[in-house]
Image: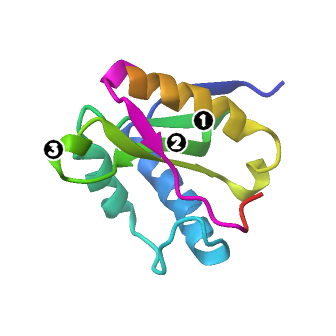
């Protein structure tokens, strides 16, 4: 039986987060990035989050299969309570409805952090 769990991301998740993100860089347009990241990039990313920038991971049998993050939209003070949402899943976990599980969880985490607006950049290739 598969056990799914959503929880706050921790530093030890960064290896899996990096692998999931880099696969998306290589094979999709979703990241808007052209170069892969190293694990230390995501360790710094996670350690330097502000209160308005929660990151959640989705685990299946204790293995990270996806994550959702609310990222700073702009450094201008008026946008402090506005975030950009990102959801990435391991390729074998796509198409199973897992993003539909992560979405309300990260929105709730954003509300609890005091966010008021969440924006998304979505490519036409993203079904």
Which residue is pictured at 26% across the width and 53% down the height?
A: 74
Instruction: Return the residue at label 1.
Output: 58
Which is more foreground, mark 2 or mark 3?
3
Dots 1 and 2: beta carbons under 8 Å?
yes
Q: What residue is shown with label 3?
A: 77
Question: At 82% from the left edge and 41% from the top edge, which residue is drawn?
Answer: 96
| Image quadrant where residue 55 sits | top left
33 vs 42: above or below: below
For marks 1 and 3 on the same chain, the one whose residue lies earlier in the sequence: 1
Identity of the residue drawn at 37% across and 19% down: 112
Between the residue at mark 1 and the residue at mark 2, the CA separation in whole angstroms equals 8 Å
Q: Please tell me whether mark 1 sits on a helix, a strand or a loop.
A: strand
Q: Is residue 63 found left or right of 112 in the rendered image?
A: right
Q: CA distance from mark 2 to mark 3?
A: 24 Å
In this rendering, position of residue 96 left or right of residue 124: right
Q: Earlier in the sequence, mark 2 or mark 3?
A: 2
Up/down of 85 relative to 24, above or below: above
Looking at the image, can residue 45 be seen? yes
Q: Most prominent secondary structure in the magenta stretch?
A: loop
């Amino acid at each position: 039986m598969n056990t799914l769990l959503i929880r706050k991301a921790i530093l030890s998740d960064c290896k899996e987060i990096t692998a999931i993100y880099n696969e998306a860089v290589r094979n999709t347009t979703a990241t808007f990035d052209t170069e892969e990241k190293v694990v230390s990039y995501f360790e710094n990313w996670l350690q330097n989050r502000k209160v308005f920038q929660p990151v959640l991971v989705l685990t299946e049998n204790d293995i990270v299969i996806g994550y959702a993050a609310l990222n700073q939209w702009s450094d201008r003070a008026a946008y402090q309570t506005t975030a950009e949402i990102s959801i990435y899943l391991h390729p074998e976990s796509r198409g199973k409805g897992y993003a539909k599980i992560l979405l309300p969880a990260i929105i709730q985490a954003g509300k609890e952090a005091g966010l008021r607006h969440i924006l998304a950049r979505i490519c036409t290739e993203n079904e």
